Amino acid sequence: MTITTLLVANRGEIACRIFRTCRDLGITTVAVYSDADADALHVREADLAVRLPGAAPADTYLRGDLVVAAARAAGADAVHPGYGFLSENAAFAAAVQDAGLVWVGPPVKAIELMASKTRAKELMAGAGVPLLAPVDPATAGEDDLPLLLKAASGGGGRGMRIVRELASLPGELLAAAAEAASAFGDGEVFAEPYVERGRHVEVQVMADAHDTVWALGTRDCSLQRRHQKVIEEAPAPGLDEALRTRLHEAAVAAARAVDYRGAGTVEFLVSAEGRPYFLEMNTRLQVEHPVTEAVFGLDLVALQLRVAEGEPLPAPEPPQPSGHAVEARLYAEDPARDWQPQTGALLTLEVPEGPGLRLDTGYTGGDTIGVHYDPMIAKVIAHAPTRTEAVRLLARALEKARIHGPVTNRDLLVRSLRHPDFAAARLDTGFYDRHLADLTAPAAGRDPSTAALAATLAEAVRGPEAVRGAEAVRGPEAVRGAEAVRGPEAVRGAEAVRPTRPAAPAPARFGAWRNVPSQSQRKRYRSEPDGTEHEVAYRTPRTGIPEPYETPGTRVLTATPGHVTLEVNGVTRHFAIATHADRVHVDAADASYTFIALPRFTDPATHTAPGSLLAPMPGTVVRLAEGLAAGGTVEAGQPLIWLEAMKMEHRILAPASGTLTALHAAPGHQVKVGALLAVVQEDPAATTPVPRPVPEETV
């Protein structure tokens, strides 16, 4: 059957990615969208779109019945699931086919066989795929430690726990089972040995209905946070030819064991000694598929569509790979603060274009990153003849990108790519456990003070330039009209404040300071997200170009509202400036900064009482500690409130032992970042230290 109209049962970046291939193939595209995604990029790019009422995934993108109904309403003849949501849901795949639609995915039976990790491992053992021996938690001993507990269904890190002490095993089993049941509706958990310093290596497979199975090389996905991938590359570096061959053969055997068709990924854990162990098979397209596409020169989505139409793969063997590709996932999150997801307006998203670079995203500048979905903004991919060249190209592209809005992991990505261990391909899943503190520490050589000075000079120029520009556009008649409405007194007052000429009339006085442009002025900024304050002094001479004051070794070469060039200790540096409300974004050649312009005087209303528990992110209160109520006693470090947003669950901990004097949170409440949730009055006699809150993955 030829596909003419395709519905993508997904959102964001992957929906946009699939639409791109559909446009190339002349296929009409259909989007589905929640109320929260009404103006999302994937909706704007689709030919047709169908609303799924509601905002939460459970009410929208996870409602297979609504998605099938949307496909019928739009006249689609095929459904592509993307990744996540319903992509590995056998019942949904069956419902699509029962509705007479083409399912762009593997057979329902293959999804069912691989859906449970425990059953999949039994099947793989029969196919000769190397496995880790399971461990019965009931009989586990000291020699079995450390153990890894994993949910039998689902993924994304939910239901996963590392156990290093036998005493903690029962509690961790209960917690993992509860988490798995909440996320996947299945509380089954199994245990296996935890491989220290193991590498996450996977093989992309593509199979058709004509007995052809391709193994499209390896990918390394070892750099992970919360068991989710951050940086991926192809081919996996540092593997000898014998190990690559064994991985390819095991992946093909796994695909044939379930009569697989379409795109899939067989994931392995490779020990430090080079022994591979089967982890799972993802019966869908992977987030990191672009690195394989780059190396093999293929369009995997086009191949998925071809196989779904019943056509064979183009050849018995895959094409030869070429070069090396690396992908970085750009997230709206703060790695220095327990990977807290961030939300808000994405004011600017500009990533350099050029040979070897690719951007896959579901956002453009002006879009909003909400609380309901994964915080990934984009994937940036670089392809070059060698690994060194690809890594360098990707790091520089990320460094030069202009990203204004919520805090992102961009700096972490750049530093990770340039870390000596990554450069030397010393990769394992514990990379961030060992290096996160160094990777998120203030960067040596970065000079936020100079960037703050550039922001100040741009702002100083902006005032008179903006006024003159407005007058030029409005014309003298408009100005005179405004004077007639406001009256002469208002006009004279405005002119007294406006610093357009050094020889202005006597300066207007405001309390304890003077607005005298020719005298030294001071501005204060707070860096985001670290909170460091900077004070900058400048003055505006008769030339009208602001100059730094009390800043030796610095000279202004040019200054406009959007661009400042400084000579700093003999080196010329360029700064692009963008101001949005009270935030100033400064992009330099080697770093980007965000500042909040601070008022001259402190607002007493901004202070909060000691012991106040504030929401670290916008989200939904999902539960409270049992019996929690105002007037009750709490212990330092005790989890009090659970807050969920963007697939993350955060525990709000008691900052000290004492009395809960106020409680403003309740299950189901939507809260904004900084909202007051509760107040704890400390008991001076208590000295229990407070651990840091731990974020937990929710999907």
Image: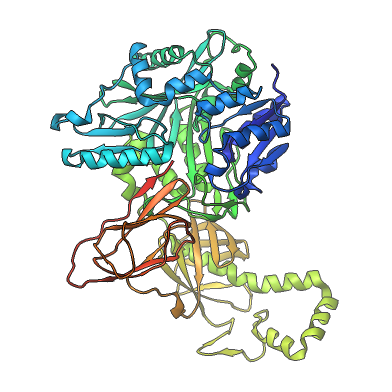
Eyeballing the image, is 661 above or below 4? Answer: below
Q: Is residue 224 visible?
A: no
Q: Is residue 241 left or right of residue 690?
A: right
* Nearest to the observer: residue 255 or residue 528: 255
The image quarter containing residue 129 is: top left
Residue 380, position in %: x, y? 53, 39
Task: Indicate the quadrant containing the C terminus: top left, top right, bottom left or bottom right.
Answer: top left
Residue at coordinates 22% horizontally, 39% vertically from top-left?
A: 170
The image quarter containing residue 118 is: top left
Eyeballing the image, is 101 above or below 34? Answer: above
Residue 303, position in %: x, y? 60, 20
Task: Indicate the quadrant containing the N terminus: top left, top right, bottom left or bottom right.
Answer: top right
Residue at coordinates 77% horizontally, 73% vertically from top-left?
A: 471
Residue at coordinates 80% horizontally, 84% vertically from top-left?
A: 485
The image quarter containing residue 294 is: top right
Residue 264, position in %: x, y? 49, 22
Q: Is residue 537 visible?
A: yes
Q: Is residue 498 left or right of residue 258?
A: right
Residue at coordinates 72% horizontally, 34% vertically from top-left?
A: 73
Residue 208, position in %: x, y? 56, 13
